[in-house]
Each structure stands twice: as structure tokens, then as C-alpha cells.
Amino acid sequence: MALLRGVFIVAAKRTPFGAYGGLLKDFTATDLTELAARAALSAGGVSPEAIDSIIVGNVMQSSSDAPYLARHVGLRVGVPKEVPAFVVNRLCGSGFQSIVSGCQEICVKDAEVVLCGGTESMSQSPYSVRNVRFGIKFGSDLKLEDTLWAGLTDQHIQLPMGVTAENLAAKHNISREDCDKYALQSQQRWKAANDAGYFNNEMVPIEVKTKKGKQTMQVDEHARPQTTLEQLNKLPPVFKKEGTVTAGNASGVSDGAGAVIIASEDAVKKHNFTPLARIVGYFVSGCDPSIMGIGPVPAINGALKKIGRSLKDMDLVEVNEAFAPQYLAVEKSLDLDPSKTNVNGGAIALGHPLGGSGTRIMAHLVHELRRRGGKYAMGSACIGGGQGIAGGLSLVSCAQLRPGLKTVEPGPARSCLNQKTWNSMKTALVLHGFLKACYVLDTLQSPRLMEERKCLNGVPLGCTKCPQDAE
């Protein structure tokens, strides 16, 4: 839906994503969310006392404290004990759903500032033995159930998620070669972005224990940047003979979490938060469970309709890469522009911790949209069982930060500003990187401000000297 109130993202952070059984295997989903939440609070200058609600998406419930996950995260990071919390599970869309639910709370004025999260420790998914609580028959053979595999299988249609991706490959005439080429592109794009430092603003470094002692983890562990097409071509199909899905072109089983803090427009003004982006709408849709991966198509179309935009208006689009044929089916159905979609790689490269991917995608879109100076972005994911979820973002321009401000004339007219107002405007402009619609910037004409932009972006404003700066 289109939102009834202005809802802004004021902080967005995520952990590095760990490989299955890798560096993060000893961190519970609660631990990972705590790390992301602490970083988000710090980055956004948000006091824990300002939080009105906590919502965390989680799927596997892999640790003993998982039923308390959201509540424990809040208490650990210093949110007052009076603040409520709950966990949501919309499978692979759970991270997105935490933000959607937060928007709903803000729109009906149940909350003004919401800490949203998404998290998963797939490495800690336990084995279980069912139907033994009240005893078993003599000679019965106890069977262990792999809860991880069970969670990746739709019991209603008795199909693993990988088979639903194979169904899409057949339906949309997607070849194994197409899938491997796309998987390679995801790895290469991730490598280029990682080498360029594009993930730095969203990433929370984590101290981990290894055989060599403690070390700082600040890079996604699952990525395989040295992968070649030849290596991908040699991998056997997993779900179907002569099929398309392999270990190399499917999303990685992994561990990780993200945290996104959202606030109402009133809260942004009250707490003097710096909004990073505005959430303009969302949409959730159902689809045929046997081709669940096509879910982003109706979800994205629904979100675009709600916000009155088209794909051509989007500067960035993210579609969670559950499987290469799944993504390619969505790309073909929506006629997505590859140059604007999953521009820095996706889950095939960095992994897909089920509950964490939605917050990872939204956090990445926020920072990448700002880095590129774009205006609109759309994030989405398919959902096991046959659903899709999508959310739209709009970059917050400098002019939108203080709706009550009037444009300021150049030169002596700046004397109408008191020092507090000037500092507030200057800080907002600097923090927002002087992106689009900064008409306030051009009218202020401050060489001091120009120097700050030079430091940040290396590009002078080209303004004339303001007489008031002689003071």
C-alpha cells in the first residue's frame, strides 16, 4: 500500500553474511540481530529510549532463546523494558515484513520510532526427533529430522524450493548456461562492489574467534569472487536430472542479520534524526506455490501501482536471488534493466540467511541509492509457499529534511538565519552528500560548505563567495 504518513529510514546496518558452518556459526540469531541493532542505533544517532517498538523477522527459530528473540534484542541494546517487541515470520520475506509491520504501526500511530530487524542462523538449525514426548513403542526406530531441509521444503505441495525454481526454468525456457552466466555475474558484481568499498556504510564489523585467535570479520564470507564459468559448468544439478539449479547458481545457506530503524516525520523533527530515505509503499502478493519464485512479479507490480510509479522511474531494483532461474524468470517477466538490477551482486554471491535478506536488501538500497544520487528504488523477494513481497524507497532530498524551511536568497539574506538553523541545515546537507534536489545548497553559497563537500566528494560546488562568510 501507499503509506498514510511519512515514514523515513533513519539508520540501516547489517552484519557480514557468514558461510554455512563458517565464522558466524557460534552466533545465535539473537546475537547477530543485537550486533546489527547496536550499529544502527549508533549510526542513526538514535537513543534506545526513543524506540517505541521492536519487530524482528526470523524463520528457523534455531536457538533456544529464539521465541524471545525480538524482546531480548531490545533489552540487550538498552531499549526500555516498557517497549513491546515481537517476531514475524513470512519466510524469505520476513526481513521485509518487519519493516512493513513497522510502517503499519507508525501509520496507525501505535509507534513513532520502530527498530526493525531480520536475522537467521542457518548453521544452528537443529535436528529434531518428533512424536517421542509421550513415549514410543518398543523397537521403534527414532528418526532425526533435519529442520533446515524441512524448512526449505513446501510440505503442502511436497516440493523443495529448488524444484520450484526448476519449474520456472522450464516454463520460461531458461537454460543451464543462462543460469551459470548469471551466477558468475552476481559473483563478479559483488567483487567489484566489495573492492570499491560500496558495502562499507551498511556493514557492521564483527569480532570472531578462529583457530588463529580473534579477528575482525567485515567481508561476506560466502562469496566466491574467483569463480569461473568453467567451474560453474562442471557442477552437477541438484534437484533434477539435466536440471538448471546447482550449488553454484543457487543462493547460499548462510548466517547474518540486518537492522533498519524507521521513524515518522514527526519523530524525525522531534529527535532531529537525519532521514536516509522515505518508504513510499509496499505490496505483498500470493502466487502458485509450485512456481513460488515468480512472487516478486505481482509484488513489484502491485507496489508500483500503489505508489503511482513505473519501473522506468526506478534507479535501482533488487530481486532476491533465491536461485538463478528464479531471478531470470522475474527479470524476463518484468523486462528488468540488468544495468539497474542487483547492481552489486546478490544472494548467489553473498548468501541468503532467510529472515535476514529483506533487511539486507533494504539497507543496501538505502546506501547505494544515496551513493549514486538516484531518486527511487525497489526491493523484493520471492517467498516459499507462493508469495512475493516488495517495498519502494524514495531518496530524501535536502529540501525535504526540514519541510518548514524556506529557500534562502544568496548573500546578505543569509543574515535572516540564526546560527542554530544554519548549523542544522548545513549538517543535513553534508550528511546527505549533496544529492539531487538540493536547491537550498545553491542559494546558501557558502565557501565553508563548499570545503566540506570537497572533503566528502572531491567536487567543489562552484558557488560565489557569500559576504556573510567574512564574519
Image (cartoon, helix red, strand yellow):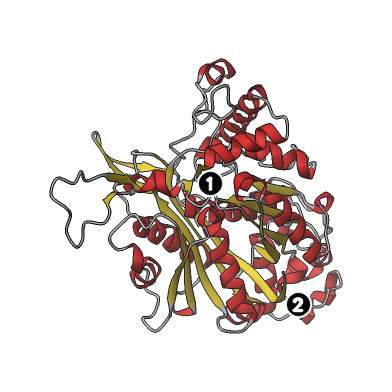
Residue 311 in percent (x, y) is at 80, 51
Q: Earlier in the sequence, mark 2 or mark 1?
A: 1
Residue designated by label 2: 403
Q: Which residue occupies the extreme front position in the image?
A: 138
Q: Which label number is shown at residue 154? A: none
- Is residue 347 in view from this perspective? yes
Residue 452 position, x and y percent, is: 66, 56
- Going by the numbered disc 1, the residue's amino acid type is Asn
Q: Nearer the viewer, residue 322 or 219?
A: 322
Query: Would residue 196 be found to the left or right of residue 54 on screen?
Result: right
**Callout 2 crowding tier (Cα within 10 Å): few <14, some 14–19, many ≥20:** few
Describe the element under mark 2 as helix, strand or loop. loop
- Compared with 21, 454 (above or below) is below
Identity of the residue drawn at 77% across and 56% down = 301
Kindly identify the residue that appears in the image at 38 percent across and 80 percent down.
Answer: 80
State which quarter of the image contains the N terminus. Answer: bottom right
Residue 331 sits above or below residue 46 on the image: above
Q: Amino acid at mark 2?
A: Pro
Above or below, 315 relative to 415: above
Left or right relative to 415: residue 370: left
Q: Position of residue 215 (x, y in %)?
A: 32, 41
Query: Between marks 2 and 1, how big is the CA–CA gap?
Result: 30 Å
Which residue is at the far right?
A: 409
Name the residue rendered at 64%, 69% in the picture. 8
